Amino acid sequence: MPGRTWRLIDTGPLDGASNMAIDEALLDSFDPERSTPVLRLYGWNPPALSFGRFQDGGKVLDLERCRADNVTVVQRITGGGVIYHADELTYSIVCAPQHLPRETTVKESFRFLTAFLLTFYRELGLPAAYAVDVPVGMARLGERTPLCFAGRESYDILIDGRKIGGNAQRRLRKAVFQHGSIPLMDRVAIGIGFLRGRPSSLDLSVADLAMLGVSIPVEVLKNRLAAAFAGAIGGTLVPSEMTAAERERAACLISGKYASYNWNRNGVEA
């Protein structure tokens, strides 16, 4: 583990279909035996809604309103609840089990792969902690909710009792994929407006960097996040571009999947 090289891919802000297609393309193109593990950083422009792979988009979202307001809806390859992506810094990780500490369970790997976020927030002067390490408050750990930020999992990150961002992992037989969000500003209320049901007391339980007094340019935040990641994994990040094969796979996934209403509504590829 120590000293391993990782690719750092910064694709900047992209539309929802492109973002989800690139995440999946990086995973599809990853060879557990030969590929270099990846940390990708990105944003969302225009804003979009994503929902988990086990959710029914039509049941949790008002799709008619989404279409009327021209808000893209995409289904993720990970689980979890709905997220409204706007004014956020997002990351994704693609690696193999051997890139993680030996004999790591799913929960332990999740803790390992989110440790850099604790470092990142703490170096911004914020008292970040895992939900499992904080006395139980108004929400039970593991309770399912339609909106990602309304729930609490053991290794969700809290600041002063408020959940900040969300993270989700997908384990394949020989690969590990994880992505997550760092909200720069409060846009949760906008996202709630597209839900069929509103979570209670959400305004009291979520946080973003602006409300916490952090107003650092996103490019500086990216550098700090990358440094925190390299420190947490004990490795080196090397700036990289997507390969031709990864770009080709992403283009196919956009046209055949993520830009398709059938996929984002019914889970059926074109």
Image (cartoon, rainbow, N blue to C red):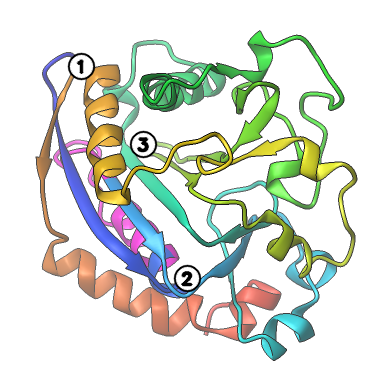
Res 16 label: 2
Mark 3 Cα-neighbour bin, 10 Å: few <14, some 14–19, many ≥20: few
User: In the displayed structure, does residue 226 sit left or right of residue 163?
Assistant: left
Classify 158 as above or below 182: above
In the rendered image, which quarter is residue 37 located in? top left
Q: Residue at x 52, y 44 (%)?
A: 210
- State which mark lies toward you, 1 or 3: 1
Mark 1 burial class by Cα count in 10 Å: few <14, some 14-19, many 20+: few
Magenta segment, which residues?
A: 20-39
Q: CA distance from mark 1 to mark 3?
A: 22 Å
Which residue is label 1 attached to? Answer: 234
Toward the viewer: 61 or 158?
158
Above or below residue 213? Residue 260 is below
Residues at marks 2 and 3, CA–CA distance in whole angstroms:
27 Å
- For the residue pair 56 and 219, the one nearer the viewer reads as 219
> What residue lies at 12% left-to-right and 69% top-to-bottom?
244
Q: State the mark number for residue 168.
A: none
Name the amino acid type tagged 3: Lys
Mark in front: 2 vs 3 = 2
Query: Which badge, 2 or 1, is on the more N-terminal residue?
Result: 2
Q: Which of disc 3 and disc 1 is earlier in sequence?
A: 3
Residue on which disc 3 sits: 174
Label 2: element kind: helix
The x and y percentages for residue 6 are 17, 35
